[in-house]
Structures are given as C-alpha cells and as structure tokens.
Image (cartoon, rainbow, N blue to C red):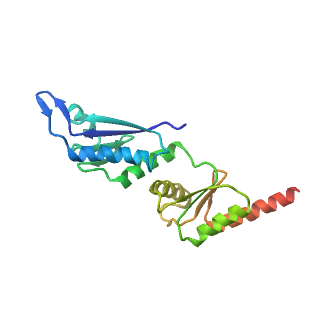
C-alpha cells in the first residue's frame, strides 16, 4: 500500500492573540465539500490524509508556501489553491501527480475514449488474444486522464502530443494500437519458437 497523499486545508477561522474569526467563510466550506466529494468519487482509489486547520491559528504555516488568503489548499507541501473555492480539476491533477510517484500502473490497462476506432480495435485485439485488461475512458473519468498524461509524457517526451489508446501490458508501457499489434505479433512469434 502506498503512503497516503497529505493535503492541508487552511480555512478562514481560528484565533491569534486577541483576534478571533467568528464569521464563517462560504468558500472555505465549499472547498472542504469539494475536497471530500472528490475523494469519494474521482480519487476514491487514492489514500488521502486530509488535515483541516484554522488559518488564523496557523497563519505562519501557509506563508512558507507563499499563501495568505484562505481557503488555502496544500498538497504534499505544494500550494495548489488559495483565495477561492477549490477547482476540482486542479485538485485531481495535483493528487494524481503525487500518487503516480508512489504507485506505478499495475496489470493490463487501456486508456481510451468512446468513439475512438483504435481504442475499440485495441480492446478487440486483447479480447481475441484472451488477455484481460482494465479500460478507462479518459473523457468520462478525469482521474484516469490526469493519471495517463504524466505516465505517457514520461515515455514519449513532454512535447509529443498524447493520443488514445495508451496501453500497458504486464505493467509495462506498450504505446498505442500500432505498438500493441506489434507486441502481440512478437509475443506470438516468441511463443511459436518455444514450441
């Protein structure tokens, strides 16, 4: 099991010396709701350690990240949001970027999208080869999109556009549909030569 991703939310509340915050912050409450809902849906497979702190009682902590305006969200020591309700996509991307450092893709995976003929061909080719796999639609599942992009960019380079399908077999990056057909042909040839 991977180490949990540490996230800290500093919300407009707390006390410092004679100063005390008594007015609730609507954006802080909304941000906490967005965090919890995202953890329960898009990031349900990621172990999260969420710590909520009162900004005025800990005002010096977010300053080291350059943050001063609550709500402040910090993921693994990196500021990702301040001064407004949390952007769900920014949160997902930040968490997935940390998660991929701790846990590599495992098994047989196709990242694709509905209506993609090469995604359909890749699925068909694996079915015909009796290879089980997990399929993730990167349009419908933003966590899958944010997981796929950095993994693929690490293989193909930061300037090369990412297309679908993107395929992993036996936890190893294969590439797209053309690379899959080559991999299947090579696997078939190596099995034939062993017989």
- Locate residue 10 relative to residue 39 in the image: left or right: left
Q: Residue at 64% of width from left, 54% of height from top? A: 108
The answer to which quarter of the image holds residue 131 is bottom right
Q: Relative to 107, does residue 137 appear above or below in the rendering? A: below
Q: Is residue 44 above or below residue 122?
A: above
Give the residue drawn at x 56%, y 47%: 104
Of the pair 188 and 26, the residue shown nearer to us: 26
Q: Is residue 41 visible?
A: yes
- Residue 123 is drawn in which quadrant? bottom right
Point out the image quarter for the N terminus: top right
Q: Position of residue 152 (x, y in %)?
A: 54, 58
Q: Is residue 135 left or right of residue 158?
A: right
User: Taking 2 as reference, is 95 above or below it?
Assistant: below
Furthest toward the right, the residue is: 195
Identify the residue at image location x=73%, y=64%. 128
Q: Quadrant of residue 183?
A: bottom right
- The picture places residue 135, in percent across and down from the top left corner, at 58, 58
Residue occupying the point 59% across, 72% down: 117
The number of numbered discs placed on residues in the rendered structure image is: 0
Q: Position of residue 53 (x, y in %)?
A: 28, 34
Is residue 71 visible from the viewing direction of this image? no
Residue at the limit of the structure toward the top, as seen here:
17
Q: Is residue 45 left or right of residue 186?
A: left
The C terminus - image quarter = bottom right
Query: In the drawing, does residue 149 fall left or right of residue 24?
Result: right
């Amino acid at each position: 099991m991977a180490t949990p991703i540490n996230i800290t939310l500093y919300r407009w509340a707390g006390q410092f010396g004679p100063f005390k915050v008594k007015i609730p912050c609507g954006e802080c409450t909304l941000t906490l709701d967005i965090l919890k809902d995202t953890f329960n849906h898009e990031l349900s497979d990621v172990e999260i350690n969420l710590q909520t702190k009162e900004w005025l009682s800990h005002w010096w902590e977010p300053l080291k990240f350059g943050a001063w305006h609550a709500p402040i969200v910090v993921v693994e020591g990196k500021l990702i949001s301040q001064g407004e309700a949390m952007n769900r996509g920014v949160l997902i991307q930040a968490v997935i970027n940390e998660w991929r450092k701790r846990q590599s893709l495992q098994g047989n995976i196709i990242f694709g999208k509905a209506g993609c003929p090469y995604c359909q061909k890749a699925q068909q080719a694996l079915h015909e080869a009796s290879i089980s796999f997990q399929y993730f639609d990167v349009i419908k599942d933003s966590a899958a999109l944010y997981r796929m992009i950095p993994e693929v960019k690490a293989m193909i380079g930061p300037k090369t556009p990412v297309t679908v399908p993107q395929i992993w077999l036996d936890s190893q990056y294969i590439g797209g549909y053309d690379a899959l057909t080559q991999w299947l042909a090579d696997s078939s040839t190596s099995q034939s030569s062993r017989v």
